[in-house]
Image (tube, rainbow, N blue to C red):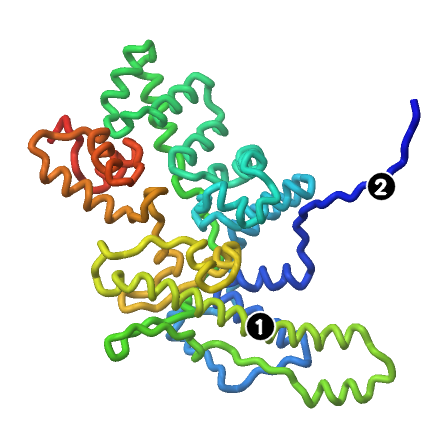
Amino acid sequence: MAINLSKNLLQKQSLKLTPSLKKSIDLLQLSRFELIKKIEKEIDQNPFLEKEDTFEVDIKTFGTDFNFEIESKVGLRETLLKQIDELHLDDQDIKIAQVIIDCMDESGQLIDDIEDVCSIMNFVFNQNKVEMVLKNIIQRLSPIGVGYRDHKECIQIQINHKNISRKIKNICNQILFNEKLDEIDIIREELINSGITKEEYEEALIEIKKCDLSPGLNFKDTKFIYPDLKIFKKDSNYQVNFIKDTFPVISLDDELVYKVKKEMKSNNKQILQKINDAKWLMSSVKKRNETVQKVGEYICSIQIAFFENNPLKIKTLSNKDIAEKIGVHPSTVSRILRHKYIETPKGIMSLKALLVSSVSRTRNISAVQLMKLIGDIVNDEKKPKSDKKIAIELNKKGFNLARRTIAKYRKKNNIPSSRYR
């Protein structure tokens, strides 16, 4: 057999993080409290950074029991990333796992679709690969149940990890994924008629009730909530401002930099690195704060109805929508929204809470708006309509909704099923 040597050109996409980019990403995800602590630490360690004396923290702002010496607890994200490091995965799985973790909220729920996760990674990996990492790696991490996309999956993950018999696990799954889940008595009757004993059914139900619907909430990233932004009404218009009063103003000690560079006989790499680190921190903090304000301004401009007490006019809004508007990547928006809060006339709330997902993939409609539509249909019906008939009626208008979606929001609207109406 002859062996031929040849050169071939191959284009290949890959994800690489430079140390500087990684630091910027980490900085973007910090809450205001954590960022202030980081700035204070950098000032102590870097002689080229100085802070203006105008920064004074009002203890009343944080509460009477505020203590700067209290360290933040280890957060869910840090806990999961540490477990990923200990698994000795290949580079691809590590990159995918890290992005999935960044797309989870504080309860451990994956708030972005698999397609959106692929989009964040510029479609370097396909959906099957991401799904495999989610199921085989993320959903096996502690606390058990994280990485879920809905509460049924959250319970299923926990049930599968429980030290119970396979039969009880199967019964749990039959209960969870039964189409008549909102009518538990009917499910009980069907399962007992199929040969399952009353004791086995009750045992399975007890195991389901033991499951934690928000497994990630046992981890708190920060001990104190302090808003970055404030929205207020001025001359019949709403304005969003970055809160500067309690934020440290840092600058480069130009005089010290000049003296050190003048007296250096040769370029000292360590000193030059400290100067560059100081410049990087100043520019990164400024960029971070500007981006937070941009995101906050756009979200509030879209959700004015919320502040005007008109929930039916609240618009659906996603990370992608914000990213397209302000000209950044959806992953940047996802990180910006992490642990960022805004002071509003209704109190302090998370920026993420102002994002409203559409319950339909074909038309923008919020959960509140869908509940109103379902309520209108039920109020106008001459004969009780089933969830399937309501779904058909709405789908004729282009909503493309499943029967189980109608059942879910009908229940949330406290409307009984057609059998009891």
Q: Quadrant of the C terminus?
A: top left
Q: Nearer the viewer, mark 2 or mark 1?
A: 2
Q: Position of residue 77 (x, y in %)?
A: 53, 50
Q: Which residue is at the front of the view, 111 or 172?
A: 111
User: Does the image show residue 64?
Assistant: no
279 to 52, vertically: above or below: above
Q: Which amino acid lies under the numbered mark 1 shown in the image of this protein? A: Ile
Quarter of image, res 198: top left
User: Does the image show residue 266?
Assistant: yes
Q: Which comes before the other along the chain, label 2 or label 1?
A: 2
Disc 2 on helix, strand or loop?
loop
Q: Residue at x 72, y 74 (%)?
A: 274
Could you say which disc has been placed on residue 7 in the image? 2
Disc 1 on helix, strand or loop?
helix
Q: Position of residue 309 (x, y in %)?
A: 21, 61
Q: Position of residue 200 (x, y in %)?
A: 35, 17
How would you rate the neighbour count of disc 1 (Cα within 10 Å): few for under 14, some for 14-19, many for 20 or more? Answer: many
How would you rate the neighbour count of disc 2 (Cα within 10 Å): few for under 14, some for 14-19, many for 20 or more? Answer: few
Q: Is residue 416 left or right of residue 122?
A: left
Q: Which residue is at the front of the view, 252 or 16?
A: 16
Q: Residue at x 31, y 61 (%)?
A: 303
Quarter of image, res 381: top left
Quote the CA–CA distance across marks 2 and 1.
Answer: 51 Å
Q: Residue at x 32, y 48 (%)?
A: 364
Residue that protrudes farthest toward the left in the picture: 382
Q: Quadrant of the N terminus?
A: top right
Residues under numbered marks 2 and 1 in contact, where contact means CB atoms less than 8 Å apart: no
Q: Residue at x 61, y 72 (%)?
A: 281
Q: Position of residue 43 (x, y in %)?
A: 62, 76
Q: Which residue is mark 1?
A: 39
Q: Which amino acid lies under the numbered mark 2 shown in the image of this protein? A: Lys
